[in-house]
Image: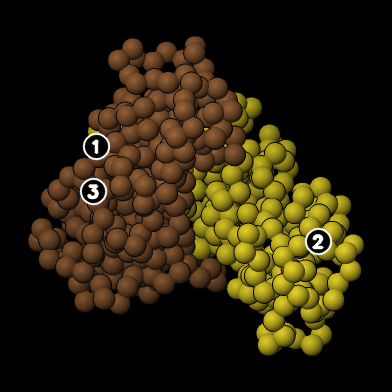
Chain colours: A brown, B yellow
């Protein structure tokens, strides 16, 4: 049983402004909730319609009915469980490894997929421009499949990023040098730009290497989706040279 | 000016059943429409709210108002132009190159991204299981960014695909042999499975090589998104070995 004001409050967390003011975000679905409960993240409240779901007794669990969870949910088909977690404090960016930098990324699915890729390829830190889509947006969280708890994500004004940590800066372009012919060091900064406009002009002076994924044959595809490009660049960074 | 029945008909093309019955599909937005007009695809009708848009006089153009195009559109914010094209007849699969085979892919965004990737990497043919999402679904088309006109896509029952064209069959798994250590020939069949369940049991006996993308460090990401995985596998197929 929950009161109306609580439902309204949880619904408000679909908005970035309310998430920031309250330092809280919402995840939905059994897989995501359990994965985050097993992470370093701190749950503030868990709403559940299924009394058979086994949850730790110390957790702040509220039993609700499907009408109530439906009113809280951002999904067309609400799940049996929804949880509110505290937004973790971003940790210092780890410049001793590769850092993925996202400049004005707009699409929540792309950001979620990139977070999942960084988790897979063990990239510790993502740095986003302040105008990149919020990583605690429900659509981003859905695409991360739980990886949100394992990658350190921070937001800042990007200009000046190149002077951090003594790393070489690699910017991704459609007309740069082939990534296959580029020597990729053990650490570096990889900048990916906006879906339509690429990397901002103001960042270009900080870029040491403009790199690209070669296009093959007579194909006339204009560009790769930014999440597909990230998959390929991170694979190139981590793979061993073929013998 | 269009009549109600015309609007209703175009709206019906959002459904696979109507698309198949009529052999027609719909694209929206200036970029997509112009790109397909410049392709081999045949336009059946073009609806446009903007008289300033320059279209070939021989094209079947109907001027409509924004209320009318809004009623035809599948988008929340309809564009100024919408076009109906004939569904092209699938051509024979080109087994002399790599063929991408999709087993029960469900997500329209994933299929659209994979079509775009095949265009980029010049993969001539995609073969989908009959229960894979329809490639003329509006959400798939939006994610292809026009690549739909440049990749040959066909649907069939997949069992038996391995006996085509004398190609080796590579199935993608989370626990296969590293793709980095796998010798990839100049032609082959690359099978990617369903988002949640992977490749169907009934196809496994046709697979010559079970391959994977290695996971790095202590990351605990369960799997890569199937479109991200496709990006990496196609890159591995096309890239030259690093010197």
Say which residue appears at 21% left-offset and 76% top-offset. Answer: A205
The residue where tag 3 is placed is A125
Q: Quadrant of residue B142?
A: bottom right
Q: Residues within 10 Å of mark 2 (few under 14, many from 20)?
A: many
- Closer to the chain start, of discs 1 and 2, is 2
Tag shown at residue B217: 1
On the same chain, marks 3 and 1? The answer is no
Depth-wise, is mark 1 or mark 2 nearer the camera?
2
* Closer-to-camera residue (B192/B132): B132
- Asked if the residues shown at circle 1 and circle 2 are in contact, with their CB atoms under 8 angstroms apart, the answer is no
SS at badge 2: helix
What is the spatial separation of the Cα atoms under label 3 and label 1, in whole angstroms?
14 Å
Say which residue appears at 43% left-offset and 32% top-offset. Answer: A6
The residue where tag 2 is placed is B10
- Asked if the residues shown at circle 3 and circle 2 are in contact, with their CB atoms under 8 angstroms apart, the answer is no
* Closer-to-camera residue (B203/B25): B25
On the same chain, marks 1 and 2? The answer is yes
Quadrant for the C terminus of chain B in the image: bottom left
């Amino acid at each position: 049983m929950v009161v109306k004001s609580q439902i309204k409050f949880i619904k408000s967390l679909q908005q970035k402004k309310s998430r920031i003011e309250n330092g809280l975000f919402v995840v939905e679905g059994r897989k995501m909730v359990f994965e985050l409960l097993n992470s370093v993240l701190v749950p503030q409240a868990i709403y559940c319609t299924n009394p058979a779901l086994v949850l730790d007794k110390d957790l702040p669990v509220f039993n609700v009915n499907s009408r109530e969870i439906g009113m809280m949910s951002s999904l067309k088909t609400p799940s049996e469980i929804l949880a509110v977690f505290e937004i973790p404090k971003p940790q210092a960016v780890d410049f001793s490894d590769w850092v993925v930098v996202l400049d004005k990324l707009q699409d929540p699915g792309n950001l979620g997929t990139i977070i999942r890729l960084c988790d897979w390829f063990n990239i510790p830190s993502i740095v986003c421009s302040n105008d990149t889509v919020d990583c605690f947006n429900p659509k981003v969280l859905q695409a991360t499949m739980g990886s949100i708890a394992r990658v350190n994500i921070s937001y800042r004004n990007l200009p000046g990023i190149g002077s951090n940590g003594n790393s070489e800066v690699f910017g991704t372009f459609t007309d740069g040098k082939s990534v296959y012919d580029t020597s990729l060091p053990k650490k570096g900064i990889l900048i990916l730009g906006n879906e339509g406009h690429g990397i901002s002009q103001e960042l270009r002076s900080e870029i040491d290497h403009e790199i690209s994924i070669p296009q093959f044959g007579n194909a006339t595809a204009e560009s790769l989706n930014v999440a597909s490009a990230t998959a390929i660049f991170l694979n190139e960074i981590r793979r061993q040279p073929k013998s």
